[in-house]
Amino acid sequence: MSRRYQDRSNKRPFKKYQKRYEEKGIILDIITSNTARRRDIPKGETRAHVLGSTWFTILEVCIKDGQNVLVMEKTSLNKEEETKIDKIVNRIAYDKLTTIGVKSLDRAIESILTDEEKRFITWINQSNAISIRLHKLQLIKGIGPKFMKLILEERKVVPFINYEDFEERTKVKDIKALIKQRILDEIRDSSVKYNLFTRSMPKTPSRRERRRY
């Protein structure tokens, strides 16, 4: 059998990027062709940059005609729900945010951490080791080996119930600010090795890699 028609079913395919969808988000900035000097935005169309509330994905969305949105407004990204969003255009990187978007990002993350306190406390209660020498908690700046050991001991006795309870029992100061900084680091730096709270940008295989399969 010629190599051209050889069965390649056993060849390892590209590792598929796991899709994780955002159901809701917070408006970071409103964009039009005039304000952003964007030639790719049709005249009369309004777009916005939105921070997803689950994976902290930054999205560019198209706003429905006749709808007005405000910076820091919470919105649904689910088409099956009542929403001002017409469609999601694409995902964008941190460096594509506008000046207003960058300033809004910090406030938006703070808002999500406040609204979904239970979710992040559950993460602290359930976080595990990445390897024999490294625990996920240690990736949060401000939590060293000493604090990590105390956190693991305390949550074993009784799980933490909120930020205040966590801080009182572990003496870690402002855990919400520490988590926020980790989220910002993951969003800003695409080379971060471990994504605790965000999803990494998908890597496009090179032309040479595609030819292998």
Image (cartoon, grey):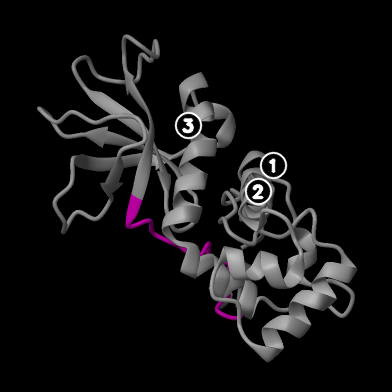
In this view, the residue in front, 52 or 108, is 108
Q: Is residue 5 visible?
A: no
Q: Please state which of the two labelled residues, at mark 3 or mark 2, is closer to the viewer.
A: 3
**Residue 134 occupies which quadrant of the picture?**
bottom right
Q: Is residue 57 left or right of residue 172?
A: left
Discs 3, 2 touching: Cβ within 8 Å: no
Position in image of residue 40 (x %, y %): 35, 20
Residue 138 within the magenta-colored segment of the rendering: no
Q: Is residue 103 left or right of residue 134?
A: left
Q: Residues within 10 Å of mark 1 (few under 14, many from 20)?
A: few
Range of magenta residues:
8-24
Q: Furthest-front residue in view? A: 168
Q: Furthest-left residue in view? A: 66
* Separation of marks 3 and 2 at Cα, in angstroms: 16 Å
The C terminus, quarter of image: bottom right
Q: Please state which of the two labelled residues, at mark 3 or mark 1, is closer to the viewer.
A: 3
At x 77%, y 60%, the residue is 139
Which of pointers 3 and 1 lies earlier in the amino acid sequence? 3
Residue on which the image places disc 3: 104
Residue on which the image places disc 2: 186
